[in-house]
Amino acid sequence: MSWSDRLRLFAALSLVAATGGCFQPLYGEAAHPGLVQAMREVEVTPIPERIGHYLADDLISRMNGSGETPKPKYRLTIKLSKNVQTPTIESQIQTADAATVTGTAFFTLTRIEDEKKPIFVGSATSSAAYDRTLQSYADLRANRDAELRVAKSLADEIELRVAGALSKAN
């Protein structure tokens, strides 16, 4: 390694070290004081069906992963619909060889003390495809994995939107 290559490497590492602490999360505590605590104070109402359970569990752990349960100030109500489509059919055996699970969540964030006036209303949609087989257990497991992927994607989107709404409300 020549001296000029070493000098370039040293300059690059110095630049990285100098700017390493400059990046902050979009909805972090430094940018929005009190947001982390406000997210912990969101109560997620139970959502029916298996995919609803996955979504609610994911949201609860994302918004309040601390293990503490402060008194809730906000309520997040979610109505979830799930649709499974089979766009292709195997011509020889006349069964679907692929399917797509689509989940649509309509959600409302309200203050618990004033539930008539919502803070934020929105919707989120996510899809996940999976291969279907003639083996019933493998087909059931692939469907469940697709539901898990849809729930995780919906939780990502809902969490970001709720954080945005709470950062404006506080």
Image (spheres, rainbow, N blue to C red):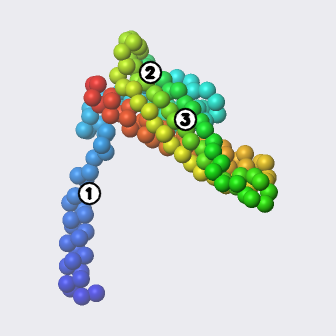
Q: How far apart are marks 3 and 1 (CA)?
A: 34 Å
Q: As rendered, which of 164 and 40 lies closer to the eye? A: 164
Label whose residue precedes the other's in the sequence (3 or 1): 1
Q: Quarter of the image containing the N terminus?
A: bottom left
Q: As rendered, which of 6 and 42 lies closer to the eye? A: 42
Q: Quarter of the image containing the C terminus?
A: top left
Q: Which amino acid does label 3 sit on?
A: Leu
Q: What residue type is labelled 1?
A: Gly
Q: For the view shown, which residue lies furthest in the bottom direction?
A: 2
| Image coordinates for residue 77, horizontal then vertical, percent | 48, 23
Name the quadrant containing residue 9. bottom left
Secondary-structure class at tag 3:
helix
Q: Mark 3 points at which residue?
A: 55
Name the quadrant containing residue 51. top right
Q: Distance between the residues labelled 2 and 3?
A: 15 Å
Are the residues tagged 2 and 1 within 8 Å (C-beta)?
no
Q: In this view, does 22 lie above or below 58?
A: below
Residue at 57 percent across and 32 percent down: it is 81
Q: Name the residue under label 2.
A: 75
Label whose residue precedes the other's in the sequence (2 or 3): 3
Residue at 44 percent across and 21 percent down: it is 75
Q: Which of marks 3 and 1 is in front?
A: 3
Left or right: where 23 falls relative to 88:
left
Q: As rendered, which of 4 and 109 lies closer to the eye? A: 109
| Image coordinates for residue 70, horizontal then vertical, percent | 43, 22
Q: Mark 1 points at which residue?
A: 20
Secondary-structure class at tag 2:
strand
Are the residues tagged 2 and 3 within 8 Å (C-beta)?
no
